Structures are given as structure tokens and as C-alpha cells.
Amino acid sequence: MGDQSYNDLANAGFKKALAETGLKGRAIESKDVVAQANDMLRSASDAGFGLVIDLEYSHGEALAEVARDYPGTQYAIFNQVRPGANVASVVFQEQDGSFLAGALAAMMASDPKVKGSVAEPRLGFIGGAKSVGIDKFLVGYIQGAHQIDPRIKVEVAYANTFGDPAKGLQTAKAMFERGVVIVYQVAGGTGLGAIKAAAENGRYAIGVDSDQDGLAKGHVLTSVIKSGDVAVERLVRAYASGQALGGKVVNIGLEGGGVKLSPMKYTADLIGKARLDKLAKLQADIEAGRIKVWNVVDQGYPDFYKP
């Protein structure tokens, strides 16, 4: 915990659901969460927890294996689909929120009121690692930007770490120096450095997972919020009511605010009503199916972006 992003938001929902249902539970952390997947899951299962919720993408294979050995325990894995009669898969439609963020970035990048804007602007993207889970955000971002300006370029970098703010700052700073106007970071703690770089250079970042707008007021254009708190609350309440969660895919998308843009408290005046109205129209078109946002997890990589 302590990433001021995905994990903290989910943990807040966990605590709220425990308080509301009267259930007892605790968060389990590790200094090496990837390598200790099997040990962490088996320890939680041996401890007698009836529901084990796993936020870590890299744990998918280990969770499916452990779930087979503990048929009396219910499990939930986030951001992927795994088989199992006692496994629930929680899938966020991050590409939809990223599409809206890309559209907004493209609208703003050529505005002379935005520092660093140019007639032919470039956008930036910093991912914590090269994976389809991260590229789901990236491709949605590019598609949204192209919806506004088909010619706009998006510079991409992978930090290969989710816990190094200094690397995020360095990577974003280099992008700004090369003429990138706005950087979207999907990099956990590493991304906090990208936000700092935006503030230090008078530019803009886009936050992720939780509302990060207040981390650098006026320099975070918006945040793409994955309401992990909503998903965790839903799972805990279902478990408390005796519902069987196993074998289900729980989709969390734009409808109901499961995935959304932040309120843009510090940048709404700069963005302006016309652009906000345009974003609302784009969201309505996505929800109605008039715009199909590409999902690399299900569809592979599109022609407009080949890694």
C-alpha cells in the first residue's frame, strides 16, 4: 500500500466494506509481491480467510493453481480472467477511460494557453512495464487522441518498474525536453515522478487508477480512475450475503462510474465547457456502442499501433 493510486484505492474500499458488513479481514503486503505469489496465496488460504482478493496481475497463474487446492475458499483476481469454480475475475475496461484521456490530451495539446503547446504536438505515455495489461491503457489513449487529431504522435516509454519515482521523473522530463506536451503515466509509484516532472517543468501529466489531480494541483490534466474501491466493495458485500462468486467475470466500465475521468477540479477552467461537453458526448457514444474502443487483451494489437 502507499502508492496513492490503485492499491490504496482498493484498500479503502476493502476497509469500508468490512465496516459495513461486520466481516473481519486484513490486507496482506510483501516487499517482493511478484516472487512470493504462491507463498502469499497459500498463507492467506491456510489462515482460513473465506474470500481472498488478489490485486496483483502477475499472480493470475499462481492463484488458479492455489484455488484448485482450496475448493472451500473463494478467490477474486483483478485485471484478467482465470478459470476455476471458486475464482471470480474482475475486469476493468481501462481502455474506455484512456480513450477519453487521449481525446482530452489531443484537444489541449495545441491550445496556446497550454505551456509547451505547438501546432503539431506530441503526447507521451509512460508504462510501468511492457505488457498487454499496460498496453490496454496505451492503445485506448492513442485511439482517443486520434479521434480528435489522426496525425498526432504518441511517444511511448516503459520504465520496467512500478516503484521508482526518480525514474518516472527522469523519463517524463526527457519527454518534455523533446517537445512532448502531455504525459499519461500508467506506472504506479514510478508514475508519481512523472507527475512531479510535469509540475517542475510547467507541463501536464495524466494520473491513473485513483484521483491524482491534487498531487500537483493544476499540472495533472485529469486522472483515469479505476474504481478498485467499488469493485472490492461489491465483492465483499456479495460474499457477506452468501453469494457464490466463483466462475464469474465481473466487468467494471464507464457505466456506473466504475471507470471514469476525475472531476478535473484544478483544470476544468483551463479545459473549458466546450471540451468538457465534447468529452461527455464521446463517453455517451462509447456507452451506446457508437464508438468501439480497442481492447488489446481481447483483440490483439491494432494497425494504428504495432509495438
Image (tube, rainbow, N blue to C red):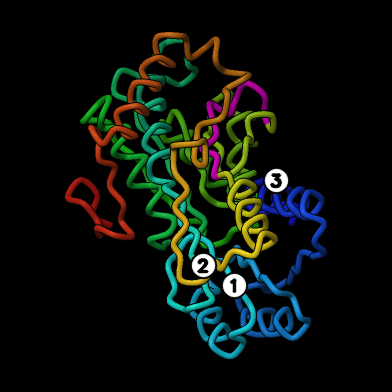
SS type, badge 2? strand
Mark toward the viewer: 3 or 1: 1
Marks 3,1: beta carbons within 8 A: no
Marks 2,1: beta carbons within 8 A: yes
Residue sitting nearer the eye, 35 or 57: 57
Q: Residues within 10 Å of mark 3 (few under 14, many from 20)?
A: some
Percent position (x, y) of residue 141? 37, 40
Residue that mark 1 sits on: 75
Residue that mark 3 sits on: 4
Percent position (x, y) of residue 261? 51, 31
Depicted 59 relative to depicted 197: above or below? below
- Which region is colored magenta? 216-226
Q: CA distance from mark 3 to mark 2?
A: 26 Å
- The quadrant of the rendering that contains the C terminus is bottom left
Residue at 62%, 79% (x, y): give it: 37
Residue at 53%, 29% (x, y): give it: 222
Amino acid residing under circle 1: Tyr
Depicted 169 relative to depicted 287: above or below? below
Residue that mark 2 sits on: 88
SS type, badge 1? strand
Residue sitting nearer the eye, 104 or 89: 89
Depicted 233 relative to depicted 84: above or below? above
Residue 219 within the segment the image draws in magenta: yes
Residue at 80%, 61% (x, y): give it: 23
Q: Residues within 10 Å of mark 1 (few under 14, many from 20)?
A: many
Residue 192 within the segment the image draws in magenta: no
Q: In terms of sequence position, does the residue under pointer 3 or pointer 1 come before the other?
A: 3
Give the total of numbered labels.
Answer: 3
Residue 192: which quarter of the image? top right
